[in-house]
Image (cartoon, rainbow, N blue to C red):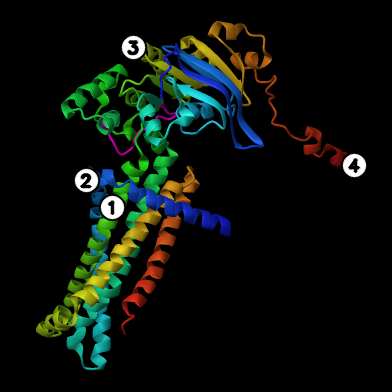
Amino acid sequence: MTNDGVLRLGFAARFIALTLAHSGTSFVRFGLVIRELYFTGVLSLIIILVSGLFVGMVLGFQGFHTLQTYGSESALGVLVALSLVRELGPVVSALLFASRAGSAMTAEIGLMKATEQLSAMEMMAVDPISRVVAPRFWAGFISMPLLAAMFSAMGVFGGYLVGVVLIGVDEGSFWSQMQSAVDFREDILNGVIKSVVFGFAITWIALFEGYDAPPTAEGVSGATTRTVVTSSLAVLGLDFVLTSFMFRGI
Amino acid sequence: MARVATGNLIEIKGVDYWYTPRRSILSGIDMVIPRGKVVAIMGISGSGKTTLLRLIGAVMKARRGEVMVDGELVSRLDNSGVYRLRRRMGMLFQFGALFTDLSVFDNVAFQMREHTALPERMIRDLVFMKLNAVGLRGAHRLMPAELSGGMARRVALARAIALDPMLMMYDEPFTGLDPISLGVIRNLIRRLNDALGATSIVVTHDVQEALEIVDYVYYMSDGKIVAHGTPDELREMAEPLVHQFVYGEPDGPVPFQYPSKGYAEDLRLRAARG
């Protein structure tokens, strides 16, 4: 059991190394990446935007409720924005990305393997890693931070809707406090770093699970489940590690 | 490497293959496939036919012995050598293995776009020529999911001959086809081989279909070649294994029953009596 786990980890490491080494085609023929960007990024937009809006609105309610106790409702903008750009934006959008795009990637590649499409490609002297895997990897890697950014932006808007429009917090202090309290390097850049790392991890896991799936119906369904479970746990674990590094100065 | 131009496109000498030394898949295979011929490799399921095809396509390497394709020793080729060799091979997979995210046209154009710098206009003409050869020019806009099994196999055939290969390999091309599609595929295999000046290997257990179109047959059982000859020779052969296979007899050297304990014992007859 442990041996198998270590063995798979080794395969996964070789797999990502090969994917990175065979990424030349993806950059020379960027059209391949753009096509995948549509499937992983654009098609995930709806779920990301709607979720971002709701998370932001809930933050508006909860934040107002707590801040009111201390008479500092005007800091609602800061609370909403910091929660989103530092934590919720990267983490929640990564979890959604894993279940929306990651599972689709695994299922697609697993089925391509089960229906011998990957073998056929290899017999046509086309390397499936550079033609199928690498463009999907870069598409996931690029779209994840963008989706996280849109999640956060939508969340801030949701917080504004509830806080300012619905409850009536002062609009000027909502935005001005947010502007003065959110630091580009400390808050936004750290959030972006998180989402880049999550994007790398999720896409790696999803592609490897698909490529390594046993070529049967159960094999592909098992691999899809593993993608969602493993990448969700990886996102939460990595979030802790990254946050602890980012807080080291405190 | 010096090319040895012989009359044989493929020469296999003393090839053994195993996954674990205790379980042999192929042993002592000797085989020659002359240029321009259509050769069948027959045998019951699990006799090692597909493995042999994979050795020729350099998907796997022989544990012992030599596989020569067009004068090149396959086991000595590095990765780029293998890919160079494969560009001159076409393979038809059992269920076609069409790329489901590409249309019929794009499937056939796939290799041309990947391996050549031909302008798109020329690719278009070539794709239509290949599709015309399999009678599916009119279906170029369809997606693989919209094709019947027989049509998918024909599109896959058009894709396999896209770069005019010197060697065509067919892995169970007749499986699961209706009689009309089966007849179409059977005739196409012969016609395309002769029109392209290629050499073809057909791995199959559809005896009657194959015997009608091939020039020579190798019969495999349990990882060994047990008989070979022209279709006529095979039909006349007294070898019990071949006879059972060619005439589809349910029982013979290949038993009807999977090895098991005694029937009476399985039904617990003695226990019931006691």
* Residue nearest the viewer, comparing B182 with B37: B37
Chain to which mark 3 belongs: B
Query: Residue A138, which numbered label?
Result: 1
Amino acid on which disc 1 is placed: Trp
Residue occupying the point 12% across, 85% down: A173
Residue B206, can we see it? no
CA separation in Å, label 2 and label 4? 78 Å
CA separation in Å, label 3 and label 1? 43 Å
The residue mark sitting in front, 2 or 4, is 2
* Residue nearest the viewer, comparing B13 with A168: B13
Instruction: List the residue tagged with mark 3.
Output: B195
Compare marks 1 and 2 and give the one earlier in the sequence: 2
Number of other residues with Cα within 10 Å of mark 1, as a class: few under 14, some 14 to 19, many 20 or more: many
The residue mark sitting in front, 4 or 1, is 1
What span is in magenta? B92-106
Instruction: List the residue tagged with mark 4.
Output: B274
Chain to which mark 2 belongs: A
